[in-house]
Image (cartoon, helix red, strand yellow):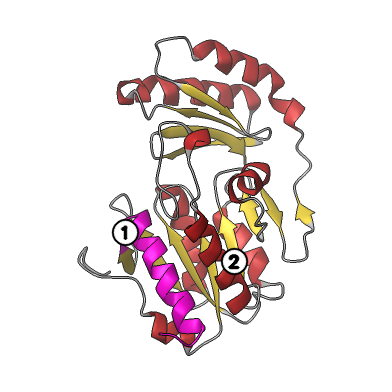
Amino acid sequence: MNSRTSTGPDPRTLCATRCALFLDVDGTLLDFAARPDEVKVDPATRDVLQRLQTLLGGALALVSGRSLKQLDELFHPLQLPSAGIHGFERRCATGVVYRPSVTAATLDRTRRWLQGVVLPGSGLLLEDKGYSLALHYRTAPQAAGRALASVRSAAAELGPAFEVIEGAKVVELKPAGQNKATAIEAFMKEPPFAGCLPVFLGDDVTDFDGFAAVRSHGGLDVAVGDRVSARWFLDGPHATRDWLGKLADCLAGKG
């Protein structure tokens, strides 16, 4: 494991092989905001993703806790291969969407109950992703315990088909059985990702599965920020964007 003074993989090394890039979004590629819907993508970031998608022959995918719908709205008009809701739903490079047979209606009762938890002044924010529900406490860290207890209680009512995962100032209730590792493994079986050296950048404990998946293929795991550790390290989303720009330049023959 590299020290916290280390940097990401040398782009020149990656340029010498055929690689696939998997990117977490919030906290890795983009800076956090008080609310998920306040996160912005600047034109330069969108442009470098477009360049990399072309230069990598399409082997670039977002692997995020956000839903596919949220990702498409955030990065519009760019639409990339993506895994949403921590791997629950996935769009392959040809545009086909894979999603297990869980309907958003399954959470209707839970959705109403959690809305009652998010009282004015509580500091809690309920993010409804359709197939999952997340309680954010970014503006009220003292509410962490309440958020976790509420989501765990909801999960107990729903049974084993759903699970609780914790992230950066958020607790989420999502369908069980899929994660970022299963998403990356699925991508790696399909063109244009098959046969590539996988590289995954993530910033949170929800990314550990993805780190393990790329390592199993001999790939590179890159921790962003100080919440998690991996064999490589970038010190924040700004460093991620800078590193992606250098990789694009190298692949284009400018590095």
Residue underneath mark 1: 229
The x, y position of residue 254, in whole percent, is 44, 85
Q: Are marks 1 and 2 in contact (CB under 8 Å)?
A: no
Would you place residue 197 above or below residue 173 in this image? below
The x, y position of residue 252, in whole percent, is 51, 83
**Magenta stretch secondary structure, dominant:** helix
In the structure shown, which secondary structural element does the residue marked by tag 1 occupy?
loop
Camera-side residue: 12 or 248? 248
Camera-side residue: 1 or 80? 80
Can you tell which quarter of the image residue 107 is in? Answer: top right
Query: Disc 2 residue type?
Result: Gln
Residue underneath mark 2: 50
In the displayed structure image, the side of residue 115 where residue 119 appears, left or right: left
Magenta-tinted stretch: 234-255
Would you place residue 231 above or below residue 138 in this image? below
The x, y position of residue 157, in whole percent, is 61, 21
Q: Nearer the viewer, mark 1 or mark 2?
A: 2
> Which residue is at the far front?
43
In the displayed structure image, the side of residue 227 where residue 42 appears, left or right: right
Q: Is residue 81 visible?
A: yes
